[in-house]
Structure formats: structure tokens, C-alpha cells
Image (tube, rainbow, N blue to C red):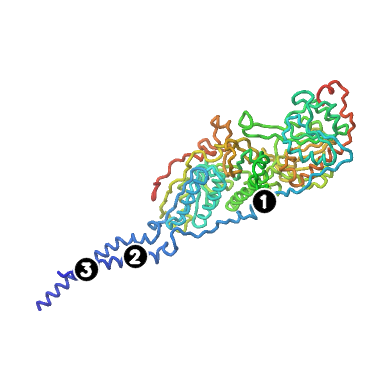
């Protein structure tokens, strides 16, 4: 009998030990479970939906756009990001990277709401990229539009084509030379792609047709809202709220705002302003390339840029390359990569690290 | 206490944690939003070959440049002078095809003559008497009153005169100021024939109304003048437009296509680019004879007709007259 009592006491003690062990194990497991859960959700973070604010302050040049497209890709592949706000202050730049800008935004807009906020300027190549946005927000001082392409060609490229052709042995008559007709043909091709992109994405909103868009005029915010180059007047927060409202994955105000590291130029002068312009004929800019000697050089470069080429005389007097009568004095505009901005915003989640 | 008394609870402890963690992992993969989509960095690419980027949409072909510049003789061998004394802005290579076409038909062409009166002075009437026709391309130096009178006498007497003028154009970085304005100064001469060049260039943004650039507008022939025989469409690279002064008798030869506008004010209208008044023809675009433009559209036919016009006159050798001392000593 006493033996039974002893066995019973041992069994109870053992049961208590096991209960304690199981409880402690469950508690530890509960602590580890969220870590494991998050690990199975990729880089998606905490599961709360978020609006990603991606900022471009500067020209649409290859360096800037490469970083911007990386940010957009990261937003697309991050499951917690349900919408994107593009904060833009860009006067455009090279056509080739402006097209990259457009394609990246277009891809993003295919997958989630994208709202553009024109902080300063979204003109020419800067506007090219935001055309797929579901909505474009502007301030009164925002500048948008300037749809068109210009080409930079060394003066000697065309004028001395005949002499050059006798300097080098070539395998064909069109090798290592370029003609005015060729440049204009290529310029028109790039212009068609740009212009029809604007008409594809903004045609329903614009109050006028393709030819009037092709004028290449730039507009301030209020005019842009009226003629359809922009949709609404508002600030960054209004754009964020609109993006969240457009997203199916965000309920009411249950979302975080993630500010990415702003893309800013690595130098202050973006494109044409540091080129010695010989003369301008229509949309062909002839530049001085005599210092380059006999080295081979890219014959022409195409730009989707808002502004006019700076001549030596203008540079000497310190004039900026604003190049448009609508330039607000508070905006540096022109080719210099836009204004310096008002700060990178205060992060709520993710931050500006 | 036996070792198994420790090992069993420890085993249970580890087993429970593993069950909880493994269960969470399985649940996460099964029900989480990222688990079934493959690699986290992967994405489906869609819409990156947009319709507006397709070749059929963006590629715009140049006008074929396959015509021939030819001159209909007019019988006699004529002597043609190409003016070089009014700071004419053209490259010698640009007029080579024109000179070749004329020489091929047996005519004689002088691109400029030796000056008889110092720098940039005009030709004397006696000099001009040696010629049957004169071609003036992109003059930027002005014509004096005496020169205009001389040329009027030249055309009144049967000489043929063709002027390819230009509207005012701005160039960047080409002068002392940040931008400078250059005007082809044919107005004083053209005014004698009731014509002058408008103050702006022309443009047309309709892709079907220009040749790959908004400034390269097309013009269509009007009327039935021999100067537009076989010419349906002319392409002007930097076209101006003509204005008639007073009761001008000038008839329109080529007019810019519908929808063409002026560059500064954007005013649409009917703009004459080439006109004829008797033995005088004025075209408001000197780039017509540039090598890159000469064979666009029907330009070579129009230029050929202009050359034929030059060598089809009938001017006596004593025209223009040299009866007054003033005409003998200066001007034309």
C-alpha cells in the first residue's frame, strides 16, 4: 500500500515536471513563432501594408534612373508594399534613360497603384516617366509638360562629314558618318515614342490633341490641372493618401509609409549646360567638340530635357539655363537637376536611413 | 535520479518547441502570402513592350531621294551668274549639282565674278550685260537702290532672276550677344517686284504635313505655271512666307500645306512660299538647294524648273542699259 503511495507521488511529480516543461516549451515556441513566420514571408516585413515613397530629385540620367528602377523593383517585389508614390523634381535628361524611367514606372503601375507628386518639376523626360501614374498631383509652382526631344551633335560631325570620310578607310558609305536626314529621322522616331506614350496614358485626360502636345510647352500646376497634364492639386501627403485609397490591399488608414533614400544627382549639372554650344538650328544643337582630337566619339546624343542649351556668353554672365518663361523664381529649374528640396521627409516606418 | 529522468523531459521540451516552430513554418508557407510565389525577387514582366513603342508606330520613313535634277535647255547656250556679293550664306558644294545640271545642257555658269568696285560692291550694269540670268541664294548683305534699279532693268529687258531668300532666323552663340538674329536681305530687291518675306518661319506638327521635323513643311504647287510642271509636293527645310506689297502682280507658285503655322505666333493660314512676277521668281527658303534637301519630295523637279526658267529668257546683250553716268560708275 505504501509502495502504491510512493508510486503515486512519483507519478504526480513527473506529471508536474512534464507540464512545466511543455508550458515552457510552448512559451518559447510562441516567442520563436513570429520570427519563423516572418522568415517564411520573404522580405515582406511585418505584414502591414505600406505605401512606398520613392523620390527622384535630379535629371533622368542613367545613374539616377538605375537607382530609381532598383527602388521600383524592390517595391514591386516587396509584398508589404501596396502602392507607390513617386516624388519628382526632374527636368528630364537623356532619352535612353528617360525611356527606362517610363518602362519601370509602367511595370510598377501594372501591379499596384502609382501616384506621382510633382515636388518641383516633372518636365520632358521627367514627365515621360510619370505618365503611367494613376494620378498626378501638383502644386501651383510645379512645372510639367515640355514634351519633345532635342539632339546634340558635334558641329563637325555633319559639316565635316565629307572630309572625315576621306580621312578614314571605311567598309561602307554610311559607316562612321552621320547625316542631317539621319539625325532628323531618328529624332522623329524617338519623338513619336515619347509623344504617343503621353497620348496613350494621358490622352483621355488631356483637353487637346497630339499636335498641341507636340508643341513642347511647359505648364505650371494650375494650368496643368486644367488642361489634363496633371490631375489634382495637393502635396505629398495628399498623394500618399490617394495612393492608399486606390490600393485594394489597404483598408482605410491602416498602412505605413516607407520613405526610400531619395535619388539625387551625383553632380549638380545634369546634361547640356556644360557643353560648348556652337549654334542651335531648330532642335539640333551643334556643340564644340574640337578638344576631343581625332578620337572617335558618339556622333549624336538625344535628350528629353526641359531647358535650353547654355551658351558661353550666358555662362559668363552667370545666367541659368531655365529656358522657359514660366520658370518660377523659387525653382532653379533648367538643367541643373532641380531644386534642392525641403528635406527627405520624416519616416514613420523604414525611415530615411 | 537516473539520467533518463532528465533526458525524457528534455526530449519533450525540445520536441514541443520543434513542433511549434515547424508548425508555424508549415502554416506560414501554406497560408502566407509570399510562400507560393517562388523566389522573392522574381516578378512577372508584363507591359514592357508597349504598343506605342512598336516599329510600325514610331518609325517614320524619309522621303525617298531618288529623283534627277535636269534642265530643259531653251535652245541657246545661256550665261548664268550665281551671286556671291551679298554675303550669301551658301556652301559652294551646294550649288555644284545646279552648276553641273546647267553645264550638262551647254550653258555657262559663273559662281560670282571678280569685284569691280572694292569689297562687297555690286556689279556694274556693263558686267551684268554679259549674263542672261542671275541666281541669288540666301543674301544677307542688302541690295542698294542702284542695284535694285539695275536688276529691274535686267528683268524688264528679258533677263531672268531667281532669288532664294530666307526669313529672319536666330542663332545661339553665334554673335556677340547670347543670341543673334540674321535676316536674309532680299527684301529691298523683292519689294521692286511687289514681294517681301514675312517676319517668321513656318512649321507644321502634322506628321503627314512635314518631313520628319516640324520645320520641314511641305508645299503644294498651285496654278498651272511651267515652273511647277511635274511638281506635286515640295519640301522646305526652313520655310518663310511671302507677303505681297501694294498691287503686286505676283502669282503664287507653291503654297505651304493646310494647317501650317507661323513659328512665333502660331497663326494658321495660307502661306505662299514661292511666287513669280514676270521674269522674277522668289522662293522664301534658300535651303531648297542644300544637298540634304535637293532631292527630297519633288524638290529636284522644282529646282530643275527654276534652272530651266533661268535659261529660257531672251535678253539682248545691251540689257541692262548703261546710259547714265551713275549706272556706269556703280550699282548694276
Q: How many marks?
A: 3
CB atoms of marks 1 and 2 within 8 Å: no
Of all chains, the one bearing label 1 is: B
Snapshot quadrant of residue B262: top right
Identify the residue under disc 1. B60
The spot of residue B117 in percent (x, y) is 78, 23
Query: Counting residues from the N terminus, which is met first, the one under dot 1 or under dot 2?
Result: 2
What kind of element bears circle 3? helix
Q: Hey, which residue is sitting farthest front in the picture?
A: A169
**Disc 2 and disc 3 in contact, CB within 8 angstroms:** no
**Residues under labels 1 and 3: Cα distance?**
81 Å
Check the picture and name the quadrant holding the C terminus of chain B: top right
Q: Would you say residue A224 is visible in this rendering?
A: no
Q: Secondary structure at mark 1?
A: loop
Residue at left offset 81%, top offset 47%: B230
Left or right, B111 with reference to A184? right
Tell me the tag on residue B9. 3
User: Looking at this view, is B312 or B144 the one in front?
Assistant: B312
Instruction: From the image, state whether disc 2 or disc 3 is nearer to you.
Output: 3
Q: Residue furthest bottom?
A: A1
**Mark 1 burial class by Cα count in 10 Å: few <14, some 14-19, many 20+:** some
Q: Are marks 1 and 2 on the same chain?
A: yes
Disc 2 target residue: B24
Identify the mark nearer the N-term, 2 or 3.
Answer: 3
Whether residues under marks 1 and 3 lie with C-beta atoms below 8 angstroms apart, the answer is no
Mark 1 vs mark 2, foreground winner is 1
Q: Which mark is residue A28?
A: none
**Mark 2 falls on what kind of element?**
helix
Locate residue B159, reporting x and y percent: 86, 33
Q: Position of residue A164 (x, y in %)?
A: 65, 41
Q: CA distance from mark 2 to mark 3?
A: 22 Å
Amino acid at each position: 500500500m505504501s509502495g502504491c503511495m510512493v508510486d503515486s507521488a512519483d507519478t504526480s511529480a513527473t506529471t508536474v515536471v512534464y507540464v512545466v516543461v511543455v508550458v515552457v516549451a510552448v512559451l518559447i515556441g510562441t516567442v520563436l513563432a513570429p520570427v519563423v513566420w516572418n522568415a517564411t514571408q520573404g522580405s515582406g516585413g511585418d505584414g502591414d501594408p505600406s505605401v512606398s515613397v520613392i523620390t527622384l530629385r535630379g535629371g533622368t540620367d542613367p545613374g539616377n534612373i538605375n537607382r530609381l528602377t532598383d527602388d521600383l523593383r524592390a517595391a514591386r517585389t516587396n509584398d508589404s508594399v501596396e502602392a507607390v508614390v513617386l516624388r519628382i523634381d526632374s527636368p528630364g535628361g537623356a532619352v535612353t534613360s528617360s525611356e527606362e524611367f517610363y518602362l519601370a514606372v509602367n511595370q510598377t503601375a501594372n501591379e499596384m497603384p502609382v501616384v506621382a507628386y510633382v515636388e518641383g518639376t516633372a518636365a520632358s523626360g521627367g514627365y515621360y516617366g510619370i505618365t503611367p501614374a494613376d494620378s498626378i498631383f501638383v502644386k501651383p509652382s510645379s512645372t510639367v509638360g515640355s514634351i519633345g526631344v532635342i539632339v546634340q551633335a558635334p558641329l563637325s560631325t555633319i559639316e565635316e562629314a565629307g572630309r572625315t570620310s576621306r580621312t578614314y578607310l571605311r567598309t561602307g558609305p554610311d559607316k562612321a558618318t552621320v547625316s542631317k536626314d539621319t539625325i532628323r529621322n531618328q529624332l522623329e522616331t524617338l519623338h513619336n515614342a515619347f509623344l504617343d506614350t503621353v497620348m496613350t496614358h494621358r490622352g483621355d485626360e488631356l483637353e487637346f490633341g497630339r499636335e498641341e502636345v507636340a508643341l513642347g510647352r511647359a505648364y505650371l500646376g494650375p494650368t496643368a490641372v486644367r488642361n489634363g497634364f496633371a490631375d489634382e492639386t495637393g502635396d505629398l501627403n495628399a498623394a500618399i493618401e490617394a495612393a492608399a485609397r486606390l490600393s485594394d490591399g489597404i483598408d482605410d488608414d491602416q498602412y505605413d509609409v516607407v520613405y526610400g533614400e531619395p535619388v539625387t544627382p551625383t553632380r549638380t549639372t545634369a546634361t547640356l549646360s556644360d557643353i560648348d554650344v556652337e549654334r542651335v538650328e531648330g532642335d539640333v544643337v551643334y556643340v564644340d567638340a574640337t578638344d576631343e582630337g581625332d578620337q572617335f566619339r558618339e556622333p549624336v546624343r538625344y535628350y528629353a530635357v526641359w531647358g535650353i542649351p547654355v551658351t558661353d556668353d550666358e555662362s559668363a554672365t552667370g545666367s541659368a539655363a531655365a529656358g522657359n518663361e514660366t520658370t518660377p523664381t523659387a525653382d532653379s529649374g533648367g538643367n541643373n537637376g532641380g531644386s534642392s528640396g525641403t528635406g527627405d521627409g520624416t519616416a514613420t516606418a523604414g525611415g530615411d536611413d | 535520479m537516473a539520467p533518463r529522468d532528465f533526458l525524457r523531459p528534455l526530449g519533450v521540451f525540445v520536441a514541443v518547441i520543434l513542433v511549434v516552430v515547424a508548425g508555424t513554418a508549415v502554416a506560414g508557407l501554406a497560408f502566407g502570402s509570399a510562400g507560393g510565389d517562388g523566389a522573392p525577387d522574381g516578378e512577372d514582366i508584363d507591359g514592357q513592350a508597349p504598343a506605342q513603342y512598336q516599329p510600325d508606330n514610331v518609325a517614320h520613313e524619309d522621303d525617298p531621294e531618288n529623283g534627277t535634277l535636269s534642265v530643259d535647255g531653251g535652245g541657246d547656250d545661256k550665261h548664268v551668274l550665281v551671286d556671291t556679293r551679298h554675303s550669301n550664306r551658301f556652301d559652294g558644294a551646294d550649288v555644284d549639282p545646279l552648276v553641273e545640271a546647267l553645264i550638262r545642257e551647254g550653258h555657262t555658269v559663273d559662281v560670282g565674278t571678280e569685284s569691280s568696285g572694292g569689297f562687297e560692291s555690286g556689279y556694274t550694269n556693263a558686267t551684268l550685260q554679259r549674263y542672261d540670268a542671275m541666281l541669288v541664294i540666301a543674301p544677307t548683305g542688302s541690295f542698294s537702290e542702284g542695284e535694285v534699279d539695275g536688276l529691274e532693268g535686267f528683268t524688264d529687258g528679258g533677263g531672268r532672276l531667281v532669288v532664294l531668300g530666307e526669313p529672319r532666323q536666330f542663332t545661339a552663340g553665334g554673335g556677340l550677344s547670347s543670341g543673334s538674329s540674321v535676316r536674309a536681305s532680299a527684301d529691298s530687291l523683292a519689294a521692286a517686284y511687289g514681294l517681301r518675306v514675312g517676319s517668321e518661319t513656318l512649321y507644321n506638327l502634322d506628321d503627314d504635313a512635314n518631313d520628319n521635323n516640324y520645320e520641314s513643311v511641305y508645299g503644294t504647287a498651285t496654278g498651272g505655271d511651267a515652273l511647277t510642271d511635274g511638281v506635286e509636293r515640295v519640301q522646305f527645310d526652313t520655310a518663310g512666307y511671302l507677303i505681297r506689297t501694294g498691287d503686286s502682280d505676283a502669282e503664287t507658285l507653291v503654297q505651304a500645306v493646310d494647317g501650317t503655322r507661323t513659328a512665333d505666333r502660331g497663326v494658321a493660314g495660307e502661306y505662299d512660299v514661292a511666287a513669280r512676277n514676270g521674269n522674277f521668281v522668289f522662293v522664301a527658303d534658300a535651303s531648297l538647294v542644300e544637298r540634304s534637301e535637293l532631292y527630297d519630295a519633288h524638290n529636284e523637279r522644282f529646282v530643275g524648273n527654276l534652272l530651266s526658267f533661268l535659261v529660257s529668257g531672251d535678253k539682248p546683250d545691251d540689257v541692262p542699259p548703261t546710259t547714265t553716268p551713275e549706272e556706269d560708275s556703280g550699282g548694276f
